[in-house]
Amino acid sequence: MKISNTICAFFVYVCLLPYVVQAQSSVKVDLMIVGGTVVTMDAERRLIEDGAVAVSGGKVIAVGTRAEVAKGYRARQTINAAGKAVIPGLINAHTHIPMVLFRGISDDLDLNDWLTRFIFPAEAKNVTEDFVRAGTRLGLAEMIRGGTTTYADMYYFEDAIADETKKAGVRGLLGQTLIDFPVPDAKTPAEGMVLAEKFVNKWQNDPLITPAIAPHAPYTISTENLKAMKALADKVNAPLIIHVAETRKEVNDITEQKGLTPMAYLDSIGFLGGRVLAAHTVFLTDAEIDLMKAKNVGSAHCPHSNMKLASGFAPVPQMLAKDIALGLGTDGAASNNDLNMWEEIDAAAKLHKVFTGDPKVVTAEQAFEMATIRGARAVYMADKIGSIETGKLADIAIVDLNGLHQTPMYNIYSHLVYATKASDVETVVINGRVIMQNRRLLTLNESAIKKDAVAYRNKIIKSLSDK
């Protein structure tokens, strides 16, 4: 009996030995996403069927087929992505996040009327730190639900925006807005610059927040102040975010006043160079596109906002031909009227086909690229985000491909650009942390956010009716 038991135990040991060795030799990681199609957006644009991604310490440490990754790694948490797309988190390259609380306040106007008659007065009467916090939470919840993991923002009380963004676990390039007239958080440009310097110093080296300085636009800031803001950015080593060439009126006014078009004017005063993210860039000359390339200026194309305000069409095909660091942005929800990056991706692909009369221009893959790896270049983070690659930060979205509107599937880029909706995003991971799973927000209270937004709606309506 003893011999029989010994022999039996020996055979069990021999049979299980490979699995024991594998378990002992495999690396334990925080998270594994297995199954599904991994859309890497790496240099080779690898598409990995039945793929897997291993995440540890906030970074991607392995990406490959499920079989390959399973051999070397075991996880504390595993997410099954079978039947889904595993994509880099989307990058919203331009917005004003608290303006979700002004969503629909005024529509069907050109930019100048919209700003001067409605937005600036509404901001003067309503924007406080508490307003900004409530709007930021609402905007963050909306963006997370749509698979946006990084956003570039410029607004007032940006320190409060950074605080709420970090609490929610979202990545942000966040710019303290500066302007020549009194605004809610600063009565003078000098006061604004003191605030901006404190903001940058506080948030530098944060794992999620990249602080920036955000002069509003060439037409709202004097040459002297633009130079001072550029000097401050150089001093504190911060990126600059600015609206440039958004409307024909802006271009005509700047050209008449300065003798140069907006981008050329900014270069003439030494503003370009370093890290500059220019929003909109609708009216650019070929020479200005070359200038952007030479100075490594990033750009945020905002198709829906530019269409709604009848601002025009950015020269996207020409910018792509010159390999400009071109991302996509929603702009603020007061002029869009949402923060849905999937609509911007779809519009970017279609709009330029209509404008050029060429159905081959701005392909689906190029449009998706603008929301991921090219967008990462625009916000100066391509070494960290924008693709699913070993060593990069684990900013990932999982997209359900099982809906009626996703069936059948022939080409993954076609599906992601022309068929996918924000509601198809199922799970979101930022910096290796799961912040939405199975459509449930894990870092934000959706009910409380909606309640606060409705309360502010009532306050805003009353403020605009008061004489």
Image (tube, helix red, strand yellow):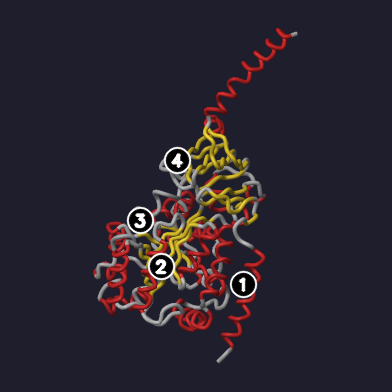
Q: Quadrant of residue 439?
A: bottom right
Q: Residues within 10 Å of mark 3 (few under 14, many from 20)?
A: many
Q: Which residue is mark 3?
A: 324
Q: Amino acid at mark 1?
A: Ala
Q: Which residue is mark 1?
A: 453
Give the CA separation, mark 4 to mark 3: 25 Å
Q: Which residue is mark 4?
A: 390
Q: Is residue 206 visible?
A: yes
Q: Nearer the viewer, residue 199 or 218?
A: 199
Q: Earlier in the sequence, mark 4 or mark 2?
A: 2
Q: Furthest-bottom residue in view?
A: 467
**Which residue does the numbered mark 2 point to in the structure image?**
199
In x, y percent, where is residue 41?
46, 45
Q: In terms of sequence position, does the residue under pointer 1 or pointer 3 come before the other?
A: 3
Indicate the secondary structure of the residue bearing disc 1. helix
Mark 3 or mark 2: whose residue is earlier in sequence: 2
Q: Quadrant of residue 390?
A: top left
Comes first in the chain, label 4 or label 1? 4
Write the residue at 51% across / 67% down. Answer: 97
Q: Residues within 10 Å of mark 2 (few under 14, many from 20)?
A: many
Horizontal side of residue 270 vs 100, given as left or right: left
Q: Is residue 196 above or below residue 85?
A: below
Q: Amino acid at mark 2?
A: Phe
Q: Nearer the viewer, mark 3 or mark 2?
A: 2
Disc 4 versus disc 1: distance between alpha carbons?
Answer: 40 Å
Tell me the amino acid under the disc marked 4: Thr
Amino acid found under the numbered disc labelled 3: Ile
Question: Whole-percent x and y of residue 434?
Answer: 57, 50
Residue at 39% over, 54% down: 377
The spot of residue 152 in percent (x, y) is: 45, 62
